[in-house]
Amino acid sequence: MERTLVILKPCTIQRGLIGEIIARFEKKGLILEGMKMTWLTDEILSEHYAHLKERSFFQRVKDAMAVCPVIVCCWKGVDAVNVVRTLAGATNGRNAAPGTIRGDYSMSVQENIVHASDSQETAAIELKRFFSEDELFNYETKNLLSLYAND
Ligand code: GDP
Ligand code: MG
């Protein structure tokens, strides 16, 4: 089992897509281990997007991530990192395949709905960046039908 970080970006919150995007991951069969709303600082964004610091759009990307709070999620599952990256689709929403989250909801490279960790190593670092251990929950997912048996 792997854990991975997803951030629902401000564009997702502002467009009223929170439920729809979370539903994509839920319906796929990933398990939600943690979720919270948080307003990201320029400091944490500089760390998170350090790989873009030489790019002309670095500050613009950080500013766009701080126009309103975001929702950070920890999803768990077999091969969760790759599964979530595949669900997210290509970075540029205009190139992302239909059926992917970015392909279905975004016409932008910057306002592309979600952040998703790109490797297991990055996921471990990013989860530590946004969650403390007591904000992540390890629990059994029971088949609802077995719960109804004693109704
Ligand atoms: P990701 O892993 O698919 O999110 O892509 P990257 O790690 O390469 O870039 C991080 C984020 O920076 C992307 O999700 C976009 O929001 C933004 N970004 C990437 N490339 C560009 C660009 O050319 N222009 C602008 N404005 N933003 C970009
Ligand atoms: Mg990336």
Image (cartoon, helix red, strand yellow):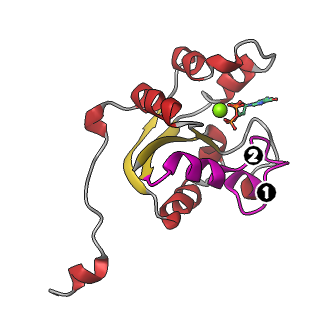
Q: Residues within 10 Å of mark 1 (few under 14, many from 20)?
A: some
In the displayed structure, 16 sits above or below 51; it is below
Q: Nearer the viewer, residue 147 or 66?
A: 147
Any part of residue 73 in sight: no
> Ligand 1: does it lie within 8 Å of the C-beta at label 2?
yes
Task: Locate residue 63 relative to residue 47 in the image: left or right.
Answer: right
Any part of residue 18 in sight: yes
The image position of residue 49, as x and y in percent, is: 62, 22
Q: Which residue is mark 2?
A: 90
Q: Is residue 126 magenta?
A: no
Which picture quadrant has residue 68?
Answer: top right
The image position of residue 3, as x and y in percent, is: 43, 44
Q: Where is ligand 1, by quadrant? A: top right
Q: Nearer the viewer, residue 140 or 41?
A: 140
Q: Residue at x 79, y 51 (%)?
A: 96
User: Helix, strand or loop at disc 1?
Assistant: loop
> Ligand 1: does it lie within 8 Å of the C-beta at label 1?
no
Q: Which residue is mark 1?
A: 97
User: Helix, strand or loop at disc 2?
Assistant: loop
The image position of residue 85, as x and y in percent, is: 62, 47
Q: Residue furthest left?
A: 150
Q: Which residues are magenta?
A: 77-103
Q: Residue at x 75, y 46 (%)?
A: 90
Q: Residues within 10 Å of mark 2 (few under 14, many from 20)?
A: some
Q: Earlier in the sequence, mark 1 or mark 2?
A: 2
Q: Nearer the viewer, residue 4 or 10?
A: 4
Q: CA distance from mark 1 to mark 2?
A: 7 Å
The image position of residue 46, as x and y in percent, is: 59, 16
- Tag 1: amino acid: Ala
In the displayed structure, 73 sits above or below 50; it is below
- Tag 2: amino acid: Ala
In the displayed structure, 147 sits above or below 47; it is below
